[in-house]
Image (cartoon, rainbow, N blue to C red):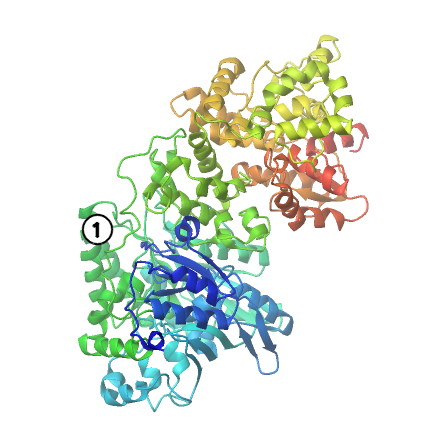
Amino acid sequence: MAEQHRPHRRPTAEAPDGFAAALRSAVRGEADFGPTARALTTMDASNYRRVPLGVLAPRDADDIAAALTVCQEYGVPVVPRGGGTSIAGQATGTGLVLDLTRHLRSILALDPAARTATVQPGVILDDLRAAAAPHGLTFGPDPSTHSRCTLGGMIGNNSCGAHSVAWGTTADNVRGLEVVRYGGEALRLEQGRAVGPHGVRELIDAHLALLRTGYPDLPRRISGYALDALLPEHPGGPDPVRAFCGSEGTLAVVTEATVRLVEAPRARALAVLGYADEPAAAEAAPGLLPYRPLTVEGMAADLVREPAGPLPRGAAWLFVETGGATPAEALAHAERILRAADAVDGAVVTDPAGQRALWRIREDASGTATRMPDGTEAWPGWEDCAVPPARLGPYLRDFRALLAQHGLRGTPYGHFGDGCIHVRIDFDLLTSAGVSRFRAFSEELADLVVAHGGSLSGEHGDGQARAELLPRMYGDELVAVFGRFKDLWDPDGGLNPGMLARPARLDENLRFDVLPRRPVDVEFGYPQDGGDFAGAVRRCVGVAKCRTETAPGAGVMCPSYRVTGEEAHSTRGRARLLHEMLAGEVITDGWRSTEVRDALDLCLSCKGCRSDCPVGVDMATYKAEFLHHHYRGRLRPAAHYALGRLPRWLRLAAPFARPLNALARIRPLAALAKRLAGITPERTIPELATQTYSRWLRGRQGKGTHIVSSSGVVQVWADTFTEHLSPQVGRAAVRVLEEATGRTVLPPPSGVCCGLTYVSTGQLDAARAVMRRTLDRIGLLPGHPLVVLEPSCAATLRTDLPELLPDDPRAHELASSVRTLAQYLEEYAPDWTPPRLDRPAVGQTHCHQHAVLGDAAERRLRERMGLTGELSGGCCGLAGNFGFEKGHWEVSVACAEEQLLPAVRGSEPGAEVLADGFSCRTQLDQLAGRRARHLAEVIAEGLEDGRP
């Protein structure tokens, strides 16, 4: 009995004896106190880092209550965590992290008539929107992280998004909450009913005057606790739900929420308005609000790194979205705004693809803005201040002046219609002098925001980034009331300590403090990061676009995460583990780390993150780097020797292709070979070509069957796959190039190799030796590009070659000469008319081509040939050696089943199945029984058929 009534321990950062065992016995969910789980949750999308004791994935509300009971008993703090995309540090903590995304993801009810939905806290916003869409409804708030943020996280931050001018903040759209306090007590919050724990009503009554006068009046006031919602005169009565929204996990943990849904316009149009500069766009925004647009978003030219969509003239733009029951109504609405706007130029975009291209610039900005145009790093911290919309223009001028005064740069953008500005600033957070300037600037900017009548946070919450400065906005007396409100909800101080009430200093717990100050000795050049591997790893700021579980159209990133749903298999998760490996606090074995190795094992090296990640994280390169160091001087997995050195074995095997193919058809021998080579037993060993591509080409030209054109020659790279496994692709390419250009295809030099298989298995010393030998033998002809038929080899030559040999000018020359077949034909045979085929096409754009080379030329060539339809995005799942390696079969198949296989199975009769990559063709053959062809083969067949 005495045990039951002992005083609760105050929360501590140390794990008390017996805590882990007590927690595991109390819950059904998974409790993980290992280094991987802890390393994955040290950071969110902010500048901050705190190491937790462990991670719990509760299965239901009872699990949450039980966990909070045990945590109170043992004095362990708790941090609720959704998608981990918080920008102010509030999703990090030193105690137990509650991962609410693994199990609590159900939409419990959806009532179209009442326009409400009841959801668990781990529901992804896009999943809720997808469920509501068939009823013509949506959830109004839509942060740019809508594909991975959770409803619980949105409630914690009072998130907003681009459509808040029409539908308000999250607090405006939540009707009821089920929450659990630290200690396990459950409460129901509804508007007009009890305002929370005992004592809250009395606290409000004691400070009525202060609460009535202490808050600025603006649409994006997110900072602090919204205690004014508990005033008796609040419309509809005191609203504890609104007061709870934006509390950043410091009061209680949400277990269930009933939210309001709004009618989604059936049609939308986008008016894009160009202005002379950013303040001009800001000053124009309030004048558009009477037209009741859905969005009034702003950005300046320094955020647009590449041309995208029909941007009108100007140095800054407003994106004003309109809706209507019909496309004509939405268009007419947008045209009225276009006529009314005092813009330098403007355009209305009704094409959905064009709108998506423009919105992608805006949605990727939280990542894109982390690198200045010159490559300098930029960081959050002052991500989302808000001022009254009418003050936004003057505020931006003052803000730019303050940046200049401190010698800082930033790229403002954001919700101009609500007066809310996002910006990443090139703070130096690696040195003490830089951190001091960060603090001084933060204090002065807080004063500037307050002087303009604004809020320190207009969307992402205060967290650790701004809570210390709340007295500058609210005054000491009101901030003291915040502390008493927190204590009534959480008297033990166990929920997310260091946030909002009694916060940590804004320059403490910076995630950069633990990284090595000197560059790490590495193999790749990392040219975009000054040769610094730590700088490359720092690229990941945690916006978590890689955690999108539905393939984003033609995008690739991140196939393994979409299969497993595990944070460790996302690009962000792997980057976090590498960060902690460099820090050496949680991951302590450095390059020998088994935690990092295991997380990277399911990385397909698809390079999708290189293009799809807003900050250009290149996990394929990081994986190769890690494997090189991890296995240096050690025995490697058998597949590294068998598949990593594949070009060598294929050259040796070429003279014996026929007998080797025959032996491979004998099942016991094939099974033995696969076991010895580390190849998964489900795979079929590809057949060797009985005549290599180069042998065929030399023999053909030696027989005098080809007339050398006086107009020149074409250099075609004889990659390992074309040479030994699919020479028909090379033969077809020769036929096409001769027809289109009248030039002679030169026989390739012997013994050249891009080094792809060595790179993908981390055998970087061997890769470098192979590449140097290739540079010695290739003999590039000046002014003659190199046509590379295999996309993975083209990508290796374009990127890995110069990054592994950064000091060899020949590497850069060769990289710049690489062209795909379609690129070469477009550049060197622009007037040639390809055969017209007029049939549908399905298949896949190779992931390396998508990431490194792009497929615009291929799209245009297919269009000229009458090959209709879009090729699949994603990754085929074979990915070179990945899908052949033992232990990867299930993930490999699941990747193919995401987009590629369904598209091919569902294709029209007679559809052309296209796949330029040998891996993609092999995957289709082995999993679908369909023969896919390289585009060169399809063109060559059309030429043979004599089609015009």
Residue 45 position in % (x across, y down): 38, 55
Reply above or below: 529 against 477: above
Q: Which residue is nearer to you in this view: 543 or 375?
A: 543
Counting every numbered tag in the picture gives: 1
Residue 499 position in % (x across, y down): 30, 66
Reply above or below: 658 against 538: above
The disc labelled 1 sits on which kind of residue? Val
Residue shown at the point (28%, 77%) measured from the top left? 487
Q: Quadrant of the N terminus?
A: bottom left
- The answer to whether residue 331 shows anywhere in this view is no
Residue 667 position in % (x across, y down): 77, 29
Q: Which residue is mark 1?
A: 435
- Judged left or right of residue 19, residue 914 is right
Residue 807 position in % (x across, y down): 38, 22
The image quarter in which residue 804 lies: top left
Q: Quadrant of the C terminus?
A: top right
Q: Which residue is nearer to you in this view: 379 or 839?
A: 379
- Judged left or right of residue 625, residue 854 is right
Looking at the rendered structure, the secondary structure element under dot 1 is helix
- Judged left or right of residue 405, residue 256 is right
Q: Residues within 10 Å of mark 1 (few under 14, many from 20)?
A: some
Reply above or below: 799 against 699: below
Q: Which residue is nearer to you in this view: 600 or 906?
A: 600
- The answer to whether residue 420 shows anywhere in this view is yes
Q: Which residue is nearer to you in this view: 421 or 240?
A: 240
